[in-house]
Amino acid sequence: MLDVFSIVLIFFVVLAVLIVFKAIAIVPQQNAWVVERLGKFDRVLSPGAGFVIPFIERVAYKHSLKEIPLDVPSQVCITKDNTQLQVDGVLYFQVTDAMRASYGSSNYIVAITQLSQTTLRSVIGKMELDKTFEEREFINHSIVSALDEAALNWGVKVLRYEIKDLTPPNEILHAMQAQITAERGKRALIAASEGRRQEQINIATGEREASIARSEGEMQAQINQAKGEAAAVLAIAEATASAITQVGEAVRAPGGIEAVNLKVAERYVDAFSNLAKTNNTLILPANLGDVGSLIASAMTVVKGVSVPGSSIGSSIVQK
């Protein structure tokens, strides 16, 4: 049997082991433990191994430094136009000061939840129903700003707030659906009218451009025709002038007058030789049989005519 000394020794050994076990504190990563000495705040243990004096010091609070999502309970908010709106959201926060998180508030999670709900009711109460659906980002930012300022004394950093759902009453939902349907119908009518207007504009523009093209084509055709006629008249005039010049040169040549006399006589005889073949009624000169006098009259005309570029009449008179 063990004697009293052995029992006392075993007791003290076990007690020493318990004291050593209680004195060593292993703090996990991303955690902070608050140590109190004789009921008063002493220090914050960082991740890793720490030492706590048994029976004098104790780990009073343990805080996680990770980002924590907090589901904010759903609540009914009244908008500026007196419409009830069921709103719920989620809040993300992080403990940044373990000492303030321990002693700044009795329960910082409840405090953050209540403050986020009251701030949300206040922000939505300043907005109309339609704006609440459009200004979610503004609502989230307003709640985060209000919470972050208050949570500073609680050792908590509010990172962001997100609205999960905005649910108006069923009557408002039906009215909104009808409004959306009417708005889409109006947009369809406007789009159709814009299409018809654009179609008419395109048709009118096409007709105007086609009319301009036709008029330009007709104008160009008239210009080309006028140029062609002018070129033809000019060519005829040049040919006539050339022929007259050649005739004048032939008349001035030796034997030219005799050739003219012979040609006139031939034309005269040919003209009157065809009179018997037709039944036409003609007015003839009294001296029809006097060919010589007719030729003399024609030669008188020839002698009195001036050929361009020369003086045929004067040349013939000189001869």
Image (spheres, rainbow, N blue to C red):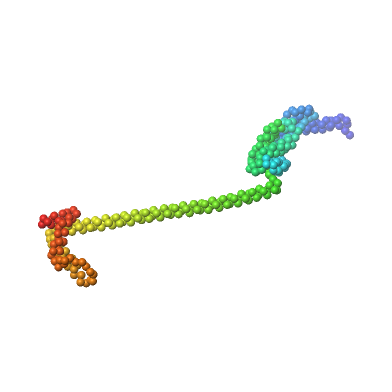
Question: In the image as oriented, which residue stretches furthest toward the left?
Answer: 319
Can you see residue 233?
yes
Q: Is residue 139 above or below residue 253?
A: above
Residue depicted at 32% across the width and 55% down the height: 226
Name the residue nearer the viewer: 141 or 26.
141
Rendering quarter of residue 86: top right
Name the residue nearer the viewer: 295 or 1.
295
Give left or right: position of 283 versus 214. left
Q: Where residue 306 sits: x, y (%)?
A: 17, 55
Q: Quadrant of the C terminus?
A: bottom left
Residue depicted at 51% across the width and 51% down the height: 198
Q: Is residue 286 above or below residue 59?
A: below
Residue depicted at 23% across the width and 69% down the height: 281
Rendering quarter of residue 282: bottom left
Give left or right: position of 228 versus 125. left
Count of marks overlaid on the render: 0
Rendering quarter of residue 313: bottom left
Q: Where residue 66 sits: x, y (%)?
A: 69, 37
Q: Where residue 59 sits: x, y (%)?
A: 76, 32
Q: Quadrant of the N terminus?
A: top right
Name the residue nearer the viewer: 46 or 81.
81
Residue depicted at 80% across the width and 29% down the height: 55
Give left or right: position of 55 versus 297. right
Q: Where residue 271 sits: x, y (%)?
A: 19, 67
Can you see residue 159?
no
